[in-house]
Amino acid sequence: MSEMHLLVTGANGQLGQCLADQLRDQGITHTLLSRQDADINDTVVLEKIIADKGITAIINAAAYTAVDKAESEPELAKRINEDGPAALAKLCSRFDIPLLHVSTDYVFDGNQQTPYVETDQTGPTGVYGKTKLDGELAVQRHCPKHIILRTAWVFSEYGNNFMKTMLRLAKERDTLGVVADQFGCPTYAGDIAKALISIAQQLHDAEQNKSGAPGRYGVYHYAGNEAVSWYGFATAIFEEAHKQGVLKSVPTVNAISTEAYPTPVKRPVYSVLSTAKIENVYNVTPSDWRVACKMQVAY
Ligand SMILES: NC(=O)c1ccc[n+]([C@@H]2O[C@H](COP(=O)([O-])OP(=O)(O)OC[C@H]3O[C@@H](n4cnc5c(N)ncnc54)[C@H](OP(=O)(O)O)[C@@H]3O)[C@@H](O)[C@H]2O)c1
């Protein structure tokens, strides 16, 4: 029986740092690669690392995530979100190891009114979503042993995210306007990390037991357990931060419309992801974002 050895790319990102914490805490053998250590497009360097260290699966947490900026940097976004995952997928295929790749709710146009399932029609509305979708297709094309995990509204104690922005603004202003007509599921990056590690372990165990894992590869949705608007999410953050003494007072939050807060890229109005498939196949529970929020507002 060989031991699982996970390679994590994008290790300095929000999800990457949560993966590092979980892998360390769970005592799982792993190798972390930041962009400085190795670009995901650098197949020569990556091939050597996989061979030398005996990597048994790759989790790709590297991505170009600047949604609005991607409109003016489409080539760079494509290089990181499509060409990089394609290169990783070809390497994984060559070494016959699984690739767990992370994608986004932005592959959908947001016009649906019921939670998106994995087989729903995609239709990205901007460069970021389009390059992420092309990355998914490349991974599917080049690596049979793939898990594509679409997630949404990610927050954590690391990097830049909505929770951190709201807490900063609440310290600077008494009144805030927050969009109330876009709905999604906030997802704690630590919970995404846990889900990815659990899936990697289950795939590894299945391979080791020679039972294989047919039908368990594919696209999965993983997100928070309760849909809410940005306004609702902000209100929950402020109430918790106030309760814990992080904010001296709760700012007045005005519910505003999408038109009142224009952005270069149109956000999906509704990007609620159904997590039924991942719960059934991998027994992974969706992110309890209210609990995570309670734990993280004080960071
Ligand atoms: N954030 C969200 O709300 C959200 C929502 C849905 C889905 N997702 C998906 O979730 C995943 C993780 O997102 P995140 O929030 O953790 O992103 P993040 O904080 O922006 O981290 C991405 C990491 O990728 C690294 N990177 C960029 N280009 C690279 C390259 N060519 N080679 C190696 N590393 C590279 C970045 O390095 P530098 O630090 O040097 O730039 C950064 O550390 C992504 O696939 C994203 O599309 C995120």
Image: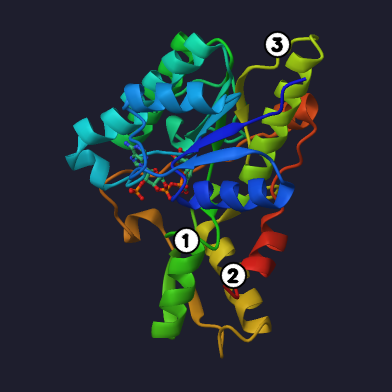
Q: Is residue 123 visible?
A: no
**Mark-to-mark CA distance, 3 and 2:** 39 Å
The residue that disc 1 covers is 162
Q: Where's residue 219, x and y in %? A: 59, 22
Task: Confirm or reject: label 3 Cβ below 8 Å from ligand 1.
Answer: no
Determine crowd level at label 1: few under 14, some 14-19, many 20+ residues with C-alpha closer than 10 A: some
Of residue 32 and residue 248, the one placed in the foreground of this image is 32
User: Label 2 amino acid?
Assistant: Ile
* Contact between labelled residues 1 and 3, with CB atoms less than 8 Å apart: no
Q: Disc 2 versus disc 1: distance between alpha carbons?
A: 10 Å
Q: Residue 247's spot in the image, x, y percent?
A: 56, 85
Give the residue type that dot 3 points to. Answer: Gly
In-image side of 26 versus 84 (left or right): right
Name the residue at 46% across, 79% down: 170
From the viewer's perspective, is the residue at label 3 or at label 2 nearer? 3
Q: Is residue 296 left or right of residue 270?
A: right
Q: Residue at x 64, y 17 (%)?
A: 217
Q: Which mark is residue 147?
A: none
x, y percentage for residue 256?
43, 64
Q: Secondary structure at mark 3?
A: loop
